[in-house]
Image (tube, rainbow, N blue to C red):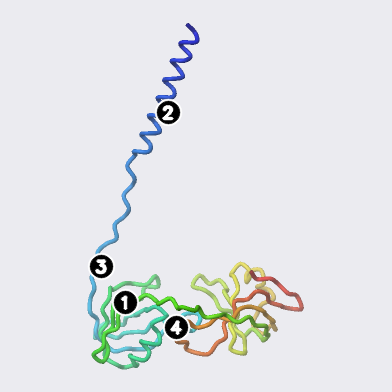
Amino acid sequence: MKSKILLATAIVLLMSIAYISNAQTKAPQPKQKEKPLQQVTTFTGQAGDWVNNDDYVFNGFYLQTSSTKYLVNFPTHMGKELTTAIKTGNTISVNGVEQTTPQGEKAIKLVSITANGTTINETPPVKPATPPKEEFLNGSGKISELQKDKQGKVKGYILDNKTILRIPPNVAQQLNKVAVAGAAISYSGSKQVLHDGEVALDSYNIIHCKTITLNGKQYLTK
């Protein structure tokens, strides 16, 4: 009799577990927040100053309409096409979505630009058949400036010979007492190359460092 009771109890427990498991699998999933509909507007005005990223590669420009100054960002691979088609002071039309940057600046999410009767659409980059090959270099110089990201963390060193050394912020933090303006530094690493369509403001050599040497001590940076 006792064995029958134990068997019945086990069966009830197994059925309960199966029911709970089945209920959990059929539980409704929370709905994902739907992206709001974005209205595309045409903004007409004069093209202003060009904007570049931390690598000095062009990725935007300012547009002055009759009432507002907007920042128009574009993918870096469109830099050559746009800097050829648009000159500062030209009257152009920009199709896009009005936005506000985290810094409170008025901006336009680009859809297309019309300049001199030609329309240029925002398009993804074309993957090259042969990716550009990075060159491994060794060099030295003096730190003239610490380059920081938007959070104020050091992300690299600008040297006095038009070289920018890229290092991880956690490495820079550990070297903040010796990697200062005026300090001599040696490095080894891969030189960053421009991709198709990109245009740089200035001819900086950007090095993604593997090692750096300060005060006679060499450090591995990645």
Give the farthest residue toward the right: 216
Residues packed near mark 4 inside 10 Å, few (<14), some (14 to 19) or many (20 plus)? some
Give the farthest residue toward the top: 1
According to the image, label 2 marks what residue? 17
Tag on residue 149? none
Please state which amino acid type lies under the numbered disc 4: Asp
Q: Is mark 2 on a helix, strand or loop?
A: helix
Please state which amino acid type lies under the numbered disc 1: Leu
According to the image, label 1 marks what residue? 110
Label located before the other in sequence (2 or 4): 2
According to the image, label 4 marks what residue? 196
Q: Is mark 1 on a helix, strand or loop?
A: strand
Residue at horizontal 40 percent and vertical 29 percent from the top: 18
Closer to the camera, 14 or 31? Answer: 14
- Left or right: where 131 falls relative to 218: left
Q: Is mark 4 on a helix, strand or loop?
A: loop
Please state which amino acid type lies under the numbered disc 2: Ile
The image shows a total of numbered marks equal to 4
Closer to the camera, 108 or 205? Answer: 205
- Left or right: where 95 falls relative to 134: left
Between circles 3 and 4, the one closer to the viewer is 4
Residues packed near mark 3 inside 10 Å, few (<14), some (14 to 19) or many (20 plus)? few
Q: In which quarter of the image is residue 154?
A: bottom right
Between circles 4 and 1, the one closer to the viewer is 4
Residues packed near mark 1 inside 10 Å, few (<14), some (14 to 19) or many (20 plus)? many
Check whether the beta carbons of the residues at disc 1 and disc 3 lie within 8 A of each other. no
Marks 3 and 2 sit apart, C-alpha to C-alpha, by: 47 Å
Label located before the other in sequence (3 or 2): 2
Check whether the beta carbons of the residues at disc 3 and disc 4 lie within 8 A of each other. no
Tag on residue 38? 3
Q: In this view, does 131 lie above or below 38?
A: below
Please state which amino acid type lies under the numbered disc 3: Gln
